[in-house]
Image (cartoon, rainbow, N blue to C red):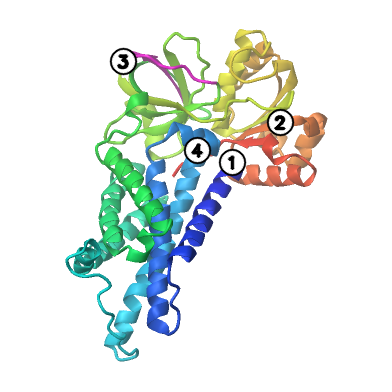
Amino acid sequence: MKNIRLSFAALFIGLTLLWLLADELAMQGFWPLRRTMVHYTGVLTMGAMSIAILLTTRPVRIERFLGGLDKGYRLHKWLGISVLGLAIIHWGWVQIPRWLREWGWLQRPARRAAEQAPDTFFGYLHSLRGMAEHIGEWAFYAAVLFIVLALSKRFPYRWFYKTHRLLALIYLALVVHSFILLPPAYWTAALGPLMILLMIAGSVAALISLTRQVGRRHQVIGRIEALHQHRDNRVLEVEVKLDGPWPGHLAGQFAFVTFDEKEGPHPFSISSSWHNDGKLTFSIKGLGDYTNTLPHTLRTGDLVKIEGPYGCFDFSGRQPQQIWIAGGIGITPFLARLQALAATGGSGSGSGSGSGSNVVLFYSTSAPDQQFIENIRQLAERAKVRLHVLVASQDGRLTPERLRQLAPQWKDSEFWFCGPAGFARDLRNDLLARGLAPQDFHQELFNMR
């Protein structure tokens, strides 16, 4: 999370500093102040939206820096919220003074002479201002609508998947708006070329999204080979046999899986280790309208599209001891690592680092399935991992205090967490307050929307 916070802050601080160097900062009187704020909010909005659009292409190089694609999507969400707020402020500075002027509450601004001769490049852009403002206004209304829908959890994923792509088209309209209205003074400062570079990168990303080329190089077709349903905890295990080459994956990584083209791809952790046999397993819990239908709609032999692997939740760290904490279906990435360790008798070769004897796994569940738990017990025994299973109705919930008591070696351990965000926050805060280094707490982010 540290790198995404740094990236988020660096973007806005960097754009602000470059804007301060480029802008005239004419703030004597309301209308000059208004013009300055319109430019400033416009720069921040387009800078944030350009990076947000770029992140939708799932760039692998950026993923590693941010700590995983799940972290990249968290940054994408923060940027989306920022774009929404900044765009509203930008629109307010543009539109509200116009209304106040029409109502007679503000005096008309003094006319400004054309900054460039009409036969120059900037003069030509100046002649297009009316069109650019009209494009920007309608693109703003559309962007607000689709960003609000994207942030609404009640908006069905299948519709989110379809409508969210339209933001790429809206972004291209805003690029036209911004390019025409970019003040001439910005072009000769560092800010102008940077904004052009951001908008070019964002435009390429938008075209990739509109033509459905996102992740195409990482896609492979497979067939469902077997289905196993655990009714007590509503988990469906889907075994897939790939028909094409797969680069292999580390235990803990995930992939985007498309069972239905109308529904689109969904991210699921891979619950099997890689044995170079073309087989993947996904353990999917019925948590929503779509995943609840999978046990009734999927059939052996169905074609599926797999895209990946993604993620940096790979159990590689600097500490010799590890503590794994899984809540509910958060056990999925740990199953893959248990399989990898079990295959070597817990020696720790293969993906990740350390041996099974240096690992403690806490699995907390409120919907126990005895066969599912027994499978975990057998894997943990073969992997030489110490396992604590806590059924909420019988054993109570796992608290930070309880964890520290059951794992007294926690100060010399690295934590790998996959489960409810609230418990992750409480546990992380507790451990950091007691001296754990921030880089020793790794969390898989469930919510990528």
Q: Is residue 11 left or right of residue 154?
A: right
Disc 3 on helix, strand or loop? loop
Earlier along the polypeptide chain: callout 4 or callout 1? 4
Extent of the magenta region: 235-250
Who's the residue at 41% across and 54% down the image? Answer: 47
Q: Nearer the viewer, mark 4 or mark 3?
A: 4
Disc 1 target residue: 420
Who's the residue at 44% across and 45% down the image? Answer: 449
Q: Please provide percent x and percent y for residue 78.
A: 48, 52
Residue 363 vertical placement versus 350 (above, below): below
Q: Please provide percent x and percent y for residue 193.
A: 38, 53
Question: Does the magenta run of residues contain 241?
Answer: yes
Q: Quadrant of the N terminus?
A: top right
Disc 2 versus disc 3: distance between alpha carbons?
41 Å
Disc 4 target residue: 70
Q: Nearer the viewer, mark 2 or mark 3?
A: 2
Residue 446 appears in view: no
Earlier along the polypeptide chain: callout 4 or callout 3? 4
